[in-house]
Structures are given as C-alpha cells and as structure tokens.
Amino acid sequence: MDLKTEKILKKVQKPARYIGGEQGCIYKNKENIDVRFAFCFPDVYEVGMSHLGIKILYHTLNTLDYVWCERVFAPWNDMQEIMKEQNIPLFALESHDPLSDFDFIGFTLQYELSFTAVINMLELSGIKAFARDRGNELRGIVIGGGPCACNPEPIADFFDIFSLGEGEESLNELMAVYRDCKKKGMKKDEFLKIVSKMDSFYVPSLYDVKYQPDGKIASIEAIGEAQKKIRKRTITDLSSVSYPENFVVPYMEVIHDRAVIEIMRGCGRGCRFCQAGYIYRPLRFKDRGVLFKDAENLCKNTGYDEISLCSLSSSDYEGIEKLLDELLTFTEKNNISLSLPSLRIDNFPKELMERLMKVRKSSLTFAPEAGSQRLRDVINKNITEEDVMKTCTIAFMGGYTSIKLYFMAGLPTETDEDIKAIATLAQKIVDLYYSNPNKPRGRGVDVSISLSTFVPKPFTPFQWERQATAEEIIHKQKYLMENITTKKIRVSWHDTNTSLIEAALARGDRRLSAVLYKAWEKGCFLDGWGEFFKPEAYYEAFRECSLSPEFYANRQREKDEIFPWEHIDCLVTKSFLLRENEKAHAAKTTKGCFEACADCGANSIEGDKICGKYKN
C-alpha cells in the first residue's frame, strides 16, 4: 500500500475494509504470473467476505501457478469520496494495484440491485463502463457470473463475457485459452470469437437483438460462429471438485464469519417462485467423508469455532443424521458450534433438533411462504398447516421461544383471504405455545413475520407472471396488519420501490444498460443499502430512455413471447416450466425430485446419474 492510500485510511469509518493482508491471503510474484484476475464483489467488504462463491473461486483460480486472483470490493461512501478527491483508483486488496493493471476484471452478480455498483467500480478504476468504449487491446476483460447471469441482458453492454453456471472448471479452461491468445499477440475481438464457441461462455457483443414496435423482443441472433444457445456449466461430481482448505480470515466483523462447508447443490423441492431451485439443478450431494475432511481442514487452518452447513435445503441432504453424528463428535471435542441453516418445515424431526441443541439454541426460521393451503399448492411448497404446527410443537417442547416465518405478498392468484390466512396461522402458533405445559416459566413467545414482495424471475414457472403493483402490495400489507390482534406477532416487510426495480431488472432486456448507466450518473451506486437507494433516480432514468419499469415488472407475459434470456440454456426446459405454470393456476402440486422425476430436463447431462443419485 502506498503512503497516500495509507494516510486516507485514518479518515474512513472502517479501514479494515481496504487494507488486505489477512490470514489466508494468497500472494504471488507478479513477474512469474501470466494472467492477473481481479475478483470483484459489487458490495462492501463485510458482505463480499461472507459469500462462499468468492472463497471457492479465489481458491480455484489461485491453484493455477500462472494465475494470480485478488479480491476487490465496493468502497463505502466515505472512502469513495476521498478516492475521487485524491484521484486514487479502485485497487485490489492483495497487491493494492489498480484494476486497470489486470487481465480480467470479474464480477459475481448475486443481486439485481448490485448492477449500478458494477458500473461504479469500473468508473472508479478509470475503466470505461461500456464494453464498446474499452478498445481492442487484449487486457481488462470484464467478465460476469453468478445467479443474475442467467439473464445477463440488462447489463450486457458493460461486459465482454459472461460465465454461465458453475465456474470451478470452466474458468480454469478460460484462463488457459487467454494465456495462449496473449502469447500469440491476439487482439480482444479475436479472443472473444474463440470464447464465443466455448462451452458455457456468452459473449454479448456477438448477438444481435431486434425489437417489435410494442417493445417486445422480435429475435435474438448469433453473429458469425457464436453458439446459438449457450448452456450453463454444471459440476457433475461435487466430491471430486477442488474445495478450499483455508479461507481468508477478516480482521473485522463480517456478516457470516465462520467456516462453511457446502454439502449439496440444487434443490429437489420445486417451489415455483424460487429461481435458485431451478438454475442450480440438478440435485447433487457431496460425499460425507469429503465433507468431514473439509470441516476439519477449515477449522484447523482458520481457527474458526463455528461450522455452517451450506445448501438450499440442508435437511434434505441424504444421510444428514449420519453426517451430523460425525461432525458433532468432532465439534463437541473441539468446542466448535455447528449451525444448519436452510431447514425445511416439513423435515425437522425431533432427533435433528436435539442434535442441534447440543451446541446451540436460538430462534428458528422457517418459510411457509403462503398462509393458506390453496396458495401453498399454487406455489408448490408441498407443506401443510399440520407440518407447520408439528414442527413448532417440537421446537416449543425443546425450549425454543422465538419463531421467524417468511411469507410473500403478491403471489400469482393471491386474494385477501390468503393474506388473512398468514395472520391466522401466526396466531395459531402463538396459541400453540401457550398450550404447551412445559413452556419456560416467565418467557413469552415471539413470532416474527417477514413479508417480502413476490418478484417473478427468469427460469421459473412464474417467469410469465406479472408482479403486483405498488398499490396492490401496500393494500396487502395494511390488510395483514388489520388482521393481527396480538403484540406477540411482529411484522416487517420490504420496500415496494425496491421490489419493483428488482423485478424490472430481473426480467429486463439489453435496453436497460442505458437506464442503469443514467441511474448511476444520478447517484445510484450501492442500491442494496436503504440509505443509498434512490428510486426516483431510477424512475427518471427509465423516463429519459423512453422505457418504464412497469413494462418489465407488472406486465403479464404471453406464453409464446420471446424472453430476453431465450438464448441461455439453464438445463430446465421451457416446456417443463410452462407445464408447471399451468398446474399452478390449477392449484395442483408436483412431487419433489426425491419422490418422482418430473422430467424437467436437468438430467440431460449424464442421464439419470446426476440427479441426486449419489448415495451417502
């Protein structure tokens, strides 16, 4: 770190965000490196350092002796203002070199409201935001990946490449191709043409999008030899893929500061609103022996005294009881706590709760998502009120006094009666607690409801559905409150403007790149933080581009409409999603992958082998 940068750290709120040098950092000699990769997380340090994906890919890329991957995070407002005043470009934490020195500038795209942060980080680095303005030299390749890359079109004009799906194998392949092209003295356009023919890589500049007079997409056509449809990459055997034996340990407190082991990928439940449940298919498990070794290595190398098991639905892991037995033997002996997030309300047996209580007792969080059984069937949640009450009974008998429940407002076919059913269910849980003769003396129950606004997402059965308008959502929120009659139930909800912009960006097309840039010019840069979110700036940007967020968010899609992501293949077929949409409107459920194959298309990689068939 140079003296100028070091001095300014005394003026910012949390200097540990910017200093680097933490335990577990990877340093390499630049003279021996052919490819430098800046892994950028478009949010602040404590958010990015909590994300497992950056830990995995930081490790994966740095296993290549000719690649040096470094970390970059978005600066907080105080640091950003000083950097602008003193002309300090955004830098990587390991070398403190500016992003303009790197071959690749990679962004993980976890949330639509981080898109302006991508623009901001590029501009803070002195790098032009629009790909068309960055010249043809083979350096400074801007690449994006992560869940939002399943519809990359709203930010397509800022990126040279998108990596679709899981990157542990594909990024290493890309590094090898880039190294070879660099040695041959190729230009960027030559390199991108080669990449456009590689599995799981999308080069947006090599696709032409045409629009109808009404604003809908008329066609998406590949240019030259670029793939007509780009299929996401999937790791077929989680047990054999490389996993970090060490994490970078932050100097400051971050959101999730613990050892994390990923036990499975995908989800076999099929909730129709859940994008992750579809884009991460097929369902795959990691071998118990490998998991135990991962946990042992991470605790030994980092000093963490907490292990968290990571997945979309941890209690669905095959052999979860055996895994917990083995891990608890290790954790209890070494005074390490064990957390198991992502629990299903219909798969929470008493024995599992007792195992977890050996190390920690806190509040429990479950997600019924809808209050009425009819609406739970619409969204294919596949849980009943009996499941909810049974689980809460087990929890209360075990000494729990706090339950948090997640619900959504604005789901397809939702009525006021469905909203009222949320309050009714919460009241039944309160009554259940007080009917328990073994409840703790002197302690009341706390039932917390978190009400989010439904956002229709690409690659889900609800990708055709409209989002409820702000007026409709406000009505639903007020109606819920009118039906709650006790202070034992607390309610919180998301800002309606946030949900509207998120929905517009989630289902947007390439024209939104101009909207995003104008929003950035108007001061948008950390939109995931309430104190910085400026909805009016977005609305002005839409108007100036002769577009509207309602066109993207609040409009019902026709069944045969061409989506902006039509040329992306996430394995799950459009015909399957359409069948699920029709079943939703008939309030019919589909069995989960554990019970029967619904022929979603995700098993097309290696036949039946990959769909959760690895036994533990």
Image (spheres, helix red, strand yellow):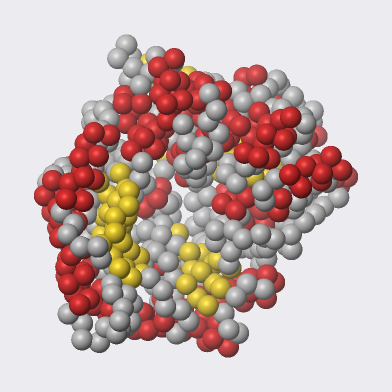
Image quadrant assignment for residue 407: bottom left
- Of 113 and 167, nearer the camera is 113
Q: Residue at x 74, y 40 (%)?
A: 91
- Residue that extends furthest to the top in the rendered view of this protein: 213
Image quadrant assignment for residue 450: bottom left
Q: Residue at x 37, y 84 (%)?
A: 354
Q: Which residue is drawn at 27% across and 41% down?
A: 462
Residue 285 x, y percent position in the rendering: 45, 66
- Of 33 and 454, nearer the camera is 454
- Of 323 and 550, nearer the camera is 550
Residue 10 x, y percent position in the rendering: 76, 47
Q: Residue at x 17, y 46 (%)?
A: 479
- Of 324 and 571, nearer the camera is 324
Residue 610 x, y percent position in the rendering: 42, 59
Relative to 506, 306 lies left or right: right
Relative to 4, 269 lies left or right: left
Residue 108 x, y percent position in the rendering: 56, 44
